[in-house]
Image: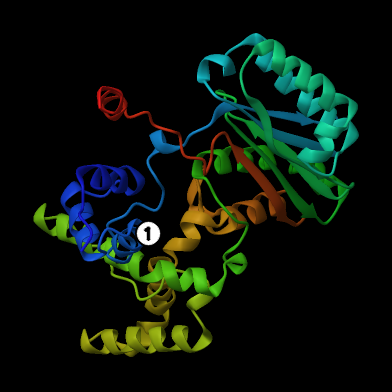
Amino acid sequence: MAAVTAAMVKELRQATDAPMMDCKKVLVEADGDMAKATELLKERGIAKAAKKADRVAAEGLCGIKIADDFSKATVVEINSETDFVAQNEGFQNLVKDTVEAIYNDQPADVKALMASDFGKTFTETVIKIGEKIEVRRFKTLTADATTALNGYIHSNNRIAVIVTAKCDSEKTAEGMRDVMKQVAMHASAMKPTTLSYKDFDAEYVESETKGRIEAIKKENEELARLGKTLKNVPQYVSMIQLTDEVLAQAEENIKAELKAQGKPEKIWDKIIPGSLARFISDNTTLDKEQALLDQNYVLDDKLTVAQAVEKAAKALGGTAEIIEFVRLEVGEGIEKKEDDFAAEVAAQMG
């Protein structure tokens, strides 16, 4: 059996934000296999959905450029090794110049950008700054006359978002631009990873189900200890799982419950829609966390983003549906290298 060291426990804790003893326990079960231990934590609802913020690595800035007529917008993420350099005026100007070049020239990818004339200028500027700097990713969205487009960059210049919606007319598209900026601000804060629950892979949804249900059960243990109202424990986590058969069974279960409670059958039709809506809400936690259209809208949490956009368009006398968005956040998905000073000293003394 592999020895489980304190360093291994620390690594797993930093990667999952799970309690120390839980990390040690699963590492022992997994015979020191870090990947297997992480999966065990996830299955038991102990690991966080995302790693701790201080584990997200690369520094740098995002840039954004939106056409004056809202026909096109570009976002870019440029990474630096240190936050100190990211605050440097030369680096900030490099970000502005880069997003401008991408907006104007529309290179196919980072490799094409760096092979262009601007790429040579970029490299020369990086040499002057004296730190490893690289363009990580970029994206441009365009809009025709009946498409509403707008974007937002957070005040720290580390998150940039563009959103587009297809509308029924030019008038509606023009009127929806401010709403698109509000949705972009929502996406900046709420971190959606995809447009709709329909984009989820069935295998991914299945892998998320058990861990999320266990997490709610654990949360209920704490709520019970505090004497607070418990959350309904779901069977599912996404609308993709709620087939017609599942919803029909849920309705039958609601009717059986109403009958057991002695509720008059003549008022069931007034109760069932609300109860069914609650069932759907309880069983779509993955959608509300990761799918933009299915998230509760920050400006009106009684509506989803899709419903809020539909309502805003209807007020203008038209229709609108979000069709695409892009959200870039500096360092997202990159782990910061952590220097172990004690280990370094021990190695030198050994």
Could you tell me residue 126's position as x and y percent? Answer: 70, 18
Q: Is residue 249 left or right of residue 146?
A: left
Which residue: 32% across, 26% down? 344
Which residue: 36% across, 82% down? 267
Q: Quadrant of the C terminus?
A: top left
Residue 163 lies, with reference to residue 158, above or below; the image says below
Quarter where residue 46 is shown: bottom left
Q: Quadrant of the N terminus?
A: bottom left
Which residue: 40% across, 74% down? 236
Which residue: 28% across, 84% down? 258
Colour scheme of this structure image? rainbow
Q: Is residue 210 left or right of residue 217?
A: right
Label 1, secondary structure: give it. helix
Residue 151 lies, with reference to residue 274, above or below; the image says above
Q: Is residue 98 left or right of residue 137?
A: right
| Residue situated in front as seen by the camera: 175 or 240 | 240
Could you tell me residue 32's position as x and y percent? Answer: 27, 58
10 Å crowding of disc 1: few (<14), some (14-19), many (20+): few
Q: Look at the image and tell me whether residue 69 can be seen.
A: no
Q: Look at the image and tell me whether residue 159 can be seen.
A: yes
Count of numbered tags = 1
Could you tell me residue 153's position as x and y percent? Answer: 63, 30
- Identify the amino acid type marked 1: Ala
| Residue situated in front as seen by the camera: 185 or 259 | 185
| Residue situated in front as seen by the camera: 323 or 182 | 323
Could you tell me residue 349's position as x and y percent? Answer: 25, 22
The residue furthest front is 350
Quarter where residue 118 is shown: top right
Give the residue pinned by disc 1. Answer: 35
